[in-house]
Amino acid sequence: QKEVEQNSGPLSVPEGAIASLNCTYSDRGSQSFFWYRQYSGKSPELIMSIYSNGDKEDGRFTAQLNKASQYVSLLIRDSQPSDSATYLCAVGYNFNKFYFGSGTKLNVKP
Amino acid sequence: ETGVTQSPTHLIKTRGQQVTLRCSSQSGHNTVSWYQQALGQGPQFIFQYYREEENGRGNFPPRFSGLQFPNYSSELNVNALELDDSALYLCASSLGLTEQYFGPGTRLTVT
């Protein structure tokens, strides 16, 4: 069974701070990595995808991938109360199987 | 909005019954994946359809089956419903085997 682990939180940060979300995965053959945001009662919304080691930036979001350590992270700069949600890490294997973590709940306090 | 639609929004079934859930993929997308999400958990991968063929499957029993049609819309069928099948069922579409975009989901309750 391929595992994707996330700290369930809640992670609380003040408005304007950097939120750091982490994810580890068990399968070294994993090839694609994604971060989704899910508001309560809604479906997941894609934030970032990353396929190679290093950093990928998109606006206030930066995804970081380290395949040697089997670790992927998401940084949210200038956190806003509207960023309060559950963040799901997803890992793709063979590009035809996808495994999600249970998510980290983020609270951004005004 | 992702352009992925699902129907119905909510559904209540009795244990032992069969259910069919439907998904229309985003325009231009040829791949559909189905997920089951229990309360407080991440989505669990059921299977993926790529160009009308099942292309990958998670750890779900054969009573979970699916179809993809020539227009790339898809159905998820669940036979012999069990109480534990109560969950949010999510459909995600993609172009090929990359970023997936989710529909709003179908909430299934089995009593």
Image (spheres, rainbow, N blue to C red):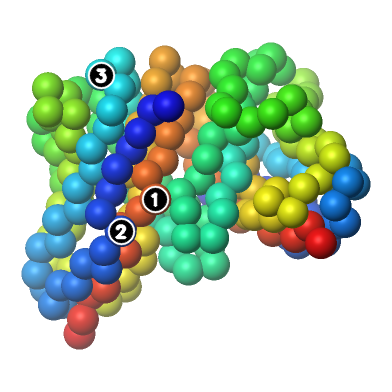
Q: Nearer the viewer, residue A24 or A42?
A: A24
Q: Which three-letter amino acid code belongs to the residue tagged 1? A: Ser
Comes first in the chain, label 2 or label 1: 2
Q: Residue furthest bottom?
A: A110
Q: Which three-letter amino acid code belongs to the residue tagged 3? A: Arg
Residue A53, percent across and down? 14, 25
Question: Residue at coordinates 23% horizontally, 37% vertically from top-left?
Answer: A24
Can residue B33 be seen from the camera position used here?
no
| Circle 2 residue | A8
Marks 3 and 1 share the same chain: yes
State left or right for residue B13 relative to residue B93: right
Q: Is residue B97 above or below residue A46?
A: above
On residue B73, the disc is none
Q: Which three-letter amino acid code belongs to the residue tagged 2? A: Ser
Residue A76, percent across and down? 17, 58
Can residue A66 be seen from the camera position used here?
yes
| Circle 1 residue | A102
Subunit under mark 3: A
| Circle 3 residue | A28
In the structure shown, which secondary structural element does the residue marked by tag 2 occupy? loop
Residue A50, percent across and down? 26, 32
Quadrant location, the C terminus of chain A: bottom left
In the structure shown, which secondary structural element does the residue marked by tag 3 occupy? loop
| CA–CA distance in space, label 3 to label 1 | 20 Å
